[in-house]
Amino acid sequence: MLTNAELAILSLLAEMPRHGYDLEAQIEARQMRNWTEIGFSSIYYILNKLEKAGLVASQREPSPGGGPDRKVYRLTEDGRATWQSAALDLLAGAGQTPHPIMIGLASVPQLDRAAVLDA
């Protein structure tokens, strides 16, 4: 069972591979802290936990501008399947959980349209 914070990070990675600072920037820009419990200091903890579970994989990539290499995270096949299933479960249970549905709704653009409508 994923936490809301884990699912929020998976949903951002479902859009595209990201490094930790990019995840933080997206969380801030989308005001995700208004509807999920995800602290700045917990992002890397969650990424490490998701990587150990096989849901994300990381790779070092050169930083634009010549800075130190960045660790970029992307969903694995298992991660994408887990994210899709969890997001659709949240959409299906909208009446039972008022706030977590926001994570499911944030995932809608990357989910199969027919599956979203069924949920």
Image (cartoon, grey):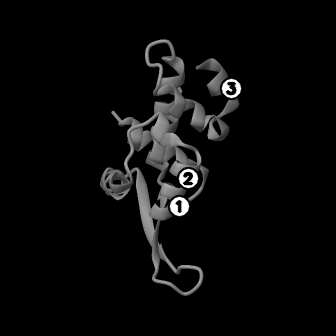
Label 1 residue SS: helix
Which residue is at the front of the view, 84 or 39?
A: 39
Visible residue check, residue 64:
yes
Disc 1 + disc 2, Cβ < 8 Å? yes
Q: Residue under circle 2?
A: 26
Q: What residue type is labelled 2?
A: Gln
Q: Residue under circle 1?
A: 22
- Label 3: few (<14), some (14–19) or many (≥20) C-alpha neighbours in 10 Å: few
Circle 2 or circle 3, nearest the eye: 2
Give coordinates of residue 13: x percent, y percent.
Answer: 53, 52
Residue under the point 53% across and 50% down: 28
Residue closest to the far right: 113
| Alpha carbons under labels 2 and 3: distance apart | 27 Å
Residue under the point 46% across and 74% down: 70
Q: Residue under circle 3?
A: 114
Q: In which quarter of the image is residue 43?
A: bottom left
Mark closer to the chain start, 2 or 3: 2
| Alpha carbons under labels 1 and 3: distance apart | 30 Å
Q: What residue type is labelled 3?
A: Ala
Residue under the point 49% across and 12% down: 95
Mark closer to the chain start, 1 or 3: 1
Q: In this view, does 73 lie above or below 55?
A: below
